[in-house]
Image (spheres, coloured by chain):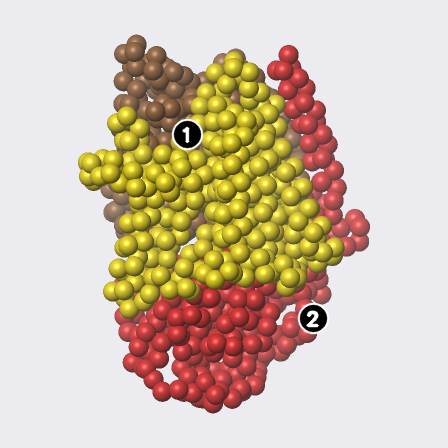
Chain colours: A brown, B red, C yellow
Amino acid sequence: MRRNLPILGVLAVLLVAIAIANPFFLEPEGFLAFVKRAAPLAILAAGQYFVIVSGEFDLSVGSLVTAEVVIAARLIDGDPGATWPVVLLLLAFGALIGLVNGMVTTLLKVPSFIVTLGMLLILSGAVFLWTGGSPRGALSEEFRQFGRGSLGPVPWSVLILVAAVAAVIALMRSDFGRTLLAAGDNPVAARLSGVRVLRVKTTAFVLSGLSAAVCAVLLGGFAGVSAKVGEGLEFQAITAVVLGGVALGGGRGSAVAAIAGAFTLQALFTLLNLYGISGALEFTVQGLILVLAVALGSVQFPRRAKSASTTA
Amino acid sequence: MPHIHRRVLAAAAMASLVALTGCSSDLPADGPGSGASSDAGKGADGKKKTGDQSSFFVQADYEAQLAMRTKQPTGPADKPWEQSIDPQPVDTAKYKKAGPYKLCFSNAATNNPWRQVGWKTMQAEVAAHKEIADFTVLDAEGKDDKQISDIAELTAKGCDALIVSPNTTATLTPAVKGACPKVPVIVFDRGVGTDCPVTFIKPIGGYAFGADGAEFLTQKVKPGGKILALRILPGVDVLETRWSAAKKTFDDSKLDVVGVEFTDGDAAKTKSIVTNYIQRHGKIDGLWLDAGATSVAAVEAFEDAGLPVPPLNGEDQQDFLQKWKDAKLTAIAPTYPTYQWRTAVIAALKILKGESVPKVWNLPQPAITEDKLNDYLKPGMPPLHYALCGCEKMDGYPQKWGGK
Amino acid sequence: MTQQLRTTLPTRGLALRGIAADSPARPVFMALGVMLILGWALFAFDGGQFFDESNIVGIQQRSAALGIVAVGQTLAILAGSLDLSVAFLMSLSSLVAAETMAQYGVLPAIGAVLAVSALTGFVNGFAITTLKVHAFIATLGVSLIIKGILEYRYDGPAGRVPESFQHLGYDRVGPVPVSALLWLAIAAAAWFVLRRTPLGYRIYAVGGGPEVARLSGVRTDRVIVATHVLCSLTAGVAGLLLAARLGAGAPTVGTDGGYDLESIAAVVLGGTALAGGKGGVAGTVGGVLLLAVLDSVFNQLEIDSFAKDVVRGVVLVAALAIYARRRLAR
């Protein structure tokens, strides 16, 4: 818990600032709306956390999210009966893309930065080749419920987020979590002590792909079909993870802090908007905060990533 | 120790950053993003809450476009892509030559649904003319520098006519100037800063688009009503003109513009922004948007809040028209018709056959009103299909455009 | 495929050794050769001329800006860093250039651009070394800062570039554009720095292993700051070139061109290891030319821009997989 403290502190300050500017935020409805808005990024950040803590990058998640939404719209095509099969297919597709990323990174020894950059290009090209340039079909109302509807007062996306966070915590407390950290910290030592580094890293990519699929279901549900739904999400997810104090290069950082990082980023967006900085110097403030927050938080972290696949 | 040193540095910078953030909020921002003091139509400094007029605003163009909206276009009424408003014909006898022709096209990009619909319409138009033996196209993928090279390359390829859809007005001007002496040039969509092309094809323009939406709100929303304006991003000429015309309409009206926000064209961000405004103001009485891509997301924000959807404008995308019909919205859809992509090919052939074309080919730019909604709603077409493609009778419709 | 490559390598390698000073660069020049032959055949089949002047000039014009900034990116990557801020810096440079030229003339404009870019490079290096921020985050943060400034100060193309300076973007000596000569000169200068100066030796040392370099007396921080200043300077020069091409400055010219990720792609295509310490400028030049010839072939075939992305992605990953194999085989 102690290592989560800095980011939770920052998050608390931002939330208080939001509440001061917008008292509605303190009401359950207002707060839940915020959590609902942050849920897709938080889930994406959780997936990215696994990859980063194993010492790799996943730049492909943004275009994977777009691809998933476009695929969902075309396959569902407004038919309610297709909803569940397509959701399962989306999860499988996300996992498959993660598997490919992971296997190319670990087996072919290509740096993950390049593998996932290539995957970004391939996905964004291929999905629109398939649909002829822009999205077609439509999402069903049932599909939209995941991101739009709620169970009583609690939005489905908040429940999905809670489930995802629970799963992530359970995963990190299991053997997998320990071996993942070990593989990211020092792959050679991990391998010598019996960790199947390749398998663990590949699993991390699969988890990232899965999280992108869930994120796509939530975002597509929240706002509908769009050709640019995933634009820039990869950088936001990496930023969120890093804000949470997770070191690029692997081996250090907590999953909860990474998710808190996503909430912090979303709170920052909300705050900048509330105080009217949006549209002008918004990005400048974001950039400064990113660099300075990492500078403040990175006391004992290594300056530079040296991942297993790039030292070969 | 360096660690401590670094912490102090970063903390100091962070502190000054916080100070900076504080300062920025006092600036008279372009958009009155902080809606905290929204009771009056004017800010504390006496300025209009809609901010300063855009640097892109040109009064004469604005007046000309507004006037064009009511003028009767010449040409066949059932083919608006062949019509023109106020044509000033230019003689093209010197370009006349016998077919078959080689047409070339330098395309700025095919990176959004509007351009996709237009591009498919253009291809269908080319396929419909046997006299076009060859159609060579280079896609600049949204890169100014590549389009400059593309135009130079096409100029050297022995084209009979060169169609250009410029990525940016100012930066493509030298390249087009370089091509004009060698080949007849047809420019459409965005213009260039030279009159050397034989013809420039465009719908009436952004001012008319913006005014159509804003005037609709002044009619439908009671005086004093709260208006939220949603823009995609600043600094793009075609979007700036839309906003500047709307701003003028709002400034002259009794409506209270409580916010001008940028959405990046992102549906999720749009929905959040609208939701925030609903929370803060309790009620929004009208929505103005500079493009239709995010209209449905804005509508859904009201639906999800359990509120009636106020009057708003969209564009001619199918998803918005469908929503309009299903939810019985009070709405209008100004358009920026994709049929101009057809016109470019038609103009090229006219020039090569020595027929006169207008120097500036102003195409009609209808706004879809409720009584015409059913004419433009095309079931089976993709959600981001633009209704004013003029493509319904072309070969391959609707499959080629993604419909069924 | 790889089997074949390996068997043909020794003989081919000898012939190419003279061209490619850096041994990791050999495959990229082989690939370039194959692409040129392919392009020639394809154009001939299509009724065009691959090696005609307009096409050769086009390939060079399209690659000059990317080529220049990729040279700088090579230095950063060799030192074990990377720079994501070059695209926004190029936009900013083009604007600073065009605005200063319109007011004060060409020379002050060049000075202003170089000053702005050197400062940006210093900030990047400072954040990475003194603030100990990972290069990915530091340069991402700096690009956000520049993006904000661009959106705040500019709402569209601005400034004017005088005709005299536009010659840089349009003139050529026979089939070789001035912009390509500029690229060649910068590549040669970087090659000289890397191969013939102490700084070059230190860049390789820091990229190969910062701890070892530090223990053997290299001031690693200074080296990293220096490479980032040099990298940003090349982005500044590329911005100047774009301003000359466009006749104005444009706030989106760098990002629309995707120069950040594309320059990194060109560098690794050229055989430089992303982790640093291995590779060189010659490979990068080959990587940029390979991308440009690929583009030219795409143009001739009029390939859909989505298909292009797919092919680019596959080429990138496949090339890196081949490099990885070669390294393992040793």
x then y, percent, for residue C74:
47, 37
Pointer 1 residue: C278
Disc 2 is placed on an element classified as helix
x then y, percent, for residue A88:
26, 38
> Callout 1: 10 Å neighbours few (<14), some, many (20+)?
many
Q: Is residue C78 above or below residue B194?
A: above
Give the residue drawn at x 50%, y 65%.
Answer: B166
Calculate the distance from the C-alpha at mark 2 to the C-alpha at mark 1: 60 Å
Give the residue drawn at x 56%, y 66%.
Answer: B174
State the quadrant of the N terminus of chain B: top right
Left or right: A231 with respect to C118?
Answer: left
Pointer 2 residue: B59
State the quadrant of the C terminus of chain B: bottom left
Left or right: A120 with respect to B66?
Answer: left
Mark nearest the camera among 2 and 1 is 1
Give the residue drawn at x 30%, y 57%.
Answer: C39
Would you say the residues marked 2 and 1 are in contact, meaning their CB atoms lie under 8 Å apart?
no
Which label belongs to residue B374? none
Disc 1 is placed on an element classified as loop
Q: Nearer the viewer, residue B282 or B25?
A: B25
x then y, percent, for residue C59:
42, 56
Which kind of residue does numbered mark 2 sit on?
Answer: Gln
Left or right: C169 with respect to A169?
Answer: right
